[in-house]
Image (cartoon, rainbow, N blue to C red):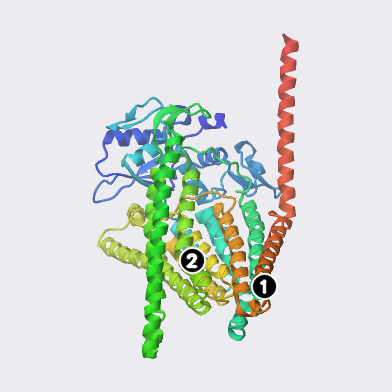
Amino acid sequence: LVESWSFLDTVESNFRPLVVIELAKGTKEETIEWFTKRIVDKKANGGAQLLVKPLVTENEVENIYLVGASHLRLLLGAESVGLVKECNDNSMRAFTYSSRKTFKDFADDNHNFLTMAECQYIIKHELENLRAKNEKMIPGYPQAKLYPGKSIVRRLLTSGILVQIFPLHDREELKKLRHSWYGRVKVGYQPLDDIRCYFGETIALYFGFLEYFTFALIPMAVIGIPYYVFAWEDYDKYVMFATFNLLWSTVILEVWKRICAILTYRWGTLLMKRQFEEPRPGFHGVLGINPVTGREEPVYSSIKRQLRIYLVSLPFVCLCLYFSLYVMMIYFDLEQWALDYHKENESNFSSLMLYVPSIIYAVVIEIMNRIYRYAAEFLTSWENHRLESSYQNHLILKVLVFNFLNCFASLFYIAFVLFDMKLLRQSLATLLITSQILNQFAESLLPYWLQKRYNRRMKKRMCSQKTDTDLSLADQVNMEKEMGTYLGTFDDYLELFLQFGYVSLFSCVYPLAAVFAVLNNITEIYSDALKMCRVYKRPFAEPTANIGVWQLAFETMSVISVVTNCILIGMSPQVDALFPDSKMDLVLTVALVEHLILAIKFIMAFVIPDKPRDIQMKLARLEFESLEALKQQVRAFQMQLHFLLIQH
């Protein structure tokens, strides 16, 4: 690999722009010259050895640069990031340039061996790994300090010199993807492999999970309809339905692990070696030596971080939770007012007024969730976590705790304090349906409408200009740089998590919850697809092997739902009538049933393997071959050493 770098030329006649770099207006010439030189410099000199071309427009010189790479450079980059590709023998192996001929569909003139998303991921990786050598500051900006080993791109971003880096859309490929994905209404599976090739594994896995989760809810929805129609008040008849739902939720989460393993093995990310995590861009501290890498980098006391978490973040979260409960009590006052109004008037209007408090409360919940999200992001950033994974885990924990209490506290209060099953059904239905409508509007319809308005203005402006190939590319870049930035799958998974809570926590009270969830998810697939293709800038591909901490979140919700449903069934008049003499027997029976269902859930989770047998065998074989190859290398080294000793 090292020898290959020396023959790599940084000039290529067929320049293919893959990534856009936008610098701030007024950026100094010496800064631009230094940064672009570092991008095109050879690897041996500390550069990225990529291709850079300024964006040419007729009106003015903009600080926008297009980045590409030669075919050879991308192949060598694929090896350095550890991409896994399919071999001619149908096995999956980490790509190496020296053994490139053994990989399926490889040819020296086949520039489609790597997907465009993979090429853009390689360029992003190389740009982020551009590191300062002996520079003490960014040329032209003495306040932007550098030290050996510091990521140049991250310093430019935090200093405001670099506005954004984003990958370009491929208009022809995007048009094909749109047509096969959401261009026509059809009953069938999504083109997950095409989505993965265009957007990367993280987004493809989200859409795979959304599709799977929707199909998995169909049995619960189908069984729930007759229960809703024929067994409205007889809660003892819900025992079988609730038990099925609780066990089914375990089965679908365990089966998802297997489907996830199949998808990520086929895509190669199940085998990818985990990259060493660098400090996140916002991390700051006093310069010190990293004991692992030996490099100079900021160091921040973990004691200070813990103090910030427990003395500031934790009290703030508790205060927000208290405020959420206070708003909930206001909602119950409104419910009582609506009920009193209905008793006095007994009209159609007063009947409609019964739903108004729940609708208002659902809107307030969504607003509070979004405001809290910004506060949680600010707090988590202020805690100054060194790694992105640590930052994400703390953010997810904060958001999940607040969202869980904010969305479900009123339902728990109605069920276990007020004991009002009719109000519980009404509130659950209103909160679920209102939140789904608001999410569809806020996440997809509104951004799409705003983006469409902007595109129309841009096209009108372009009509008066001369069009040629360069200008067409310039127009595309100018349109895309103004598009919104997709912030990741966090909000999408959070929406599914809360929906799963509405469906599973009180399934014995409102069987139609699964029906509304299925209907929402069908429209969600189309609206999210529209959002990815038309509303946001193309995100960089991010390899991933699973849905991460969200798997644990869904499993935790599944366990909580066992407890809530068992208590609700135990509280029903029909079950209560079976234990007229001793309430303690009722409590013990409910606790026994709950423990029994939990035991069955955990046994099922243990019995169902996370990976299919054939994938387990393939992984074991690869591990065996890796160990054998390592042994051969050790033997070859020992023989060489022995030969040298004999010679001397």
- Image position of 449 (left or right of 511): left
Q: Report the residue at 35% width, 35% height from top.
A: 35
Which amino acid type is marked by label 1?
Answer: Ser
Q: Is residue 536 visible?
A: no
What residue does disc 2 label? 408
Residue 312 in the image, given as x and y percentages of width and height: 39, 46
Q: Who comes first in sequence, dot 1 or dot 2?
A: 2
Residue neighbourhood size for the residue with mark 2, other residues' Cα within 10 Å, grouped as few (<14), some (14–19), many (≥20) = some
Q: Secondary structure at mark 2?
A: helix
| For residue 496, side relative to residue 57 (left or right) | right
Q: Is residue 237 above or below residue 172?
A: below
Res 361 quadrant in image: bottom left
In depth, the one of 517 and 527 nearer the eye is 517
Residue 632, above or below 272: above
Residue under the point 47% across and 44% down = 388
The residue sitting at 55% across, 64% down in the picture is: 210
Quarter occupied by the C terminus: top right
541, above or below 8, in the image = below
